[in-house]
Amino acid sequence: RGQYLVYVGTYTTKTESKGIYAYEFDSATGKLTPKGVAAETPDPSWVAVHPSGKVLYAANEAGKASTVSAFAIDAKNGKLTILNQLPSLGEDPCYLSFDKTGKYVLVANYSSGTIAVFPILADGRLGEHTAMLKDQGATGPNKERQEGPHAHWIEVSSDNRFAFVADLGLDAILSYRFDASKGSLTPNKPFFLRPLTAGAGPRHATFSPGGGHFYVLSEINSTVTAFAYAPDHGVFGYLGGVPMLPAGFEGRNDAAEIAIHQSGKWLFASNRGHDSIAVFSIDPASGKLTAAGGFPTGGREPRHFALDPTGQYLLAENQLSGNIVEFRIDPATGKLTATGEVLQVPSPVCVAFLVKR
């Protein structure tokens, strides 16, 4: 337990937001204290703190003018100082992650369906890209949402040998081989994994803490699908899908974020429209999911949420309400209880934690 910084990414276009906001977080009490604007930067829709704790990277979502920015972190006051900014090599970057060596940033560009890899230089700046590819394959059946490739998520496997992409437009998980000596990506064999219901629209995914299971959140049909993961070949075996919405719900819904509790016992997934967090228990042996309740997020359109590093709290970012609502997680049941902590932030869409050293 201790002191953390929380960075909040936002949308600035047509909102009151200035960019990235910082908060102090005390994990002993759950108290969040505003530190103000950490950096003025346009539409930082995804923020990621480097494992070193010294640099924050942001995806600046701006159509054809989209960039990725590197900021030096001042852990004392939470302020961010721009190091450099490079074109994201695509339109509307919506996800950033690091390889397991911490030497590369991987970027998913949604509108263009492209992915890119940037090396991280010694001072934290971004170097010239080492890879840029456009996702390839047949599109899904939804003519409005799946007219072309839409890379929404990219992460490497725990052994750093593969990079997986959730492509909403292609209705697929794409499997790339990742070479950390060069920062290169090459299509794996098999490359195009389409183990989902047609039109599902995979958005985000996550591995179980042990790495043996893989869970995909599909935005369009609001489901979470479980897979067994075969690390030797970077492929998945279907285990089954579960709905994120209660039976009988007829309203609009777009599923958004997914995360697994540090204990490995609980999976959380957010609904935009139903405006809730769905909770599932995970069978540790089989990896299968069982519904364990749904909890209103206290606002509209929870595009993102994050678990604090101690696993005690969940912060739900309600984009259209301009608030972040804190919940305490019951470790025995996965139940979420609002703590009463509510932050007012314009258009919050991403949260990243930093351990204060």
Image (cartoon, rainbow, N blue to C red):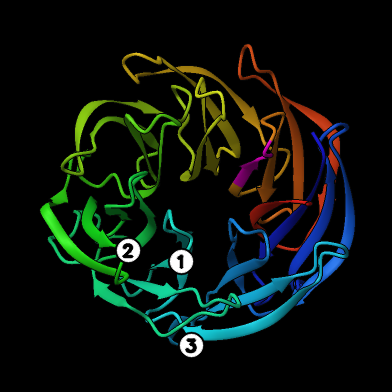
> Helix, strand, or loop for circle 3?
helix
Q: Marks 2 and 1, how far apart in space?
A: 8 Å
Front residue (pair 72, 25) = 72
Which amino acid is tagged 1?
Answer: Lys
Measured as percent of width and height from the top left, residue 182 is found at 29, 72
Residue 150, compared with residue 300, is above or below; it is below
Amino acid type, callout 3? Ala
Q: Report whether residue 170 is seen.
A: no
The reply to whether callout 1 and callout 3 are in contact (CB within 8 Å) is no
Question: In the image, what residue occupies the spot 72% across and 28% down?
Answer: 312
Residue at figure coordinates x 89%, y 57% from the top left: 34
To which residue does mark 3 refer? Answer: 65
Crowding around mark 1 (Cα neighbors within 10 Å: few <14, some 14 to 19, many 20+) is some
Asked if residue 203 lies in the magenta stretch, the reply is no
Q: Nearer the viewer, mark 3 or mark 2?
A: 2
Classify residue 22 as left or right of residue 186: right
Find numbered disc 1 in the image and state the secondary structure of the residue it sits on: loop
Q: Position of residue 294 (x, y in %)?
A: 58, 25
Q: Which residue is mark 1?
A: 103
Q: Which mark is residue 180?
A: 2
Kindly check if marks 2 and 1 are in contact, taking CB atoms under 8 A apart as contact.
Answer: yes
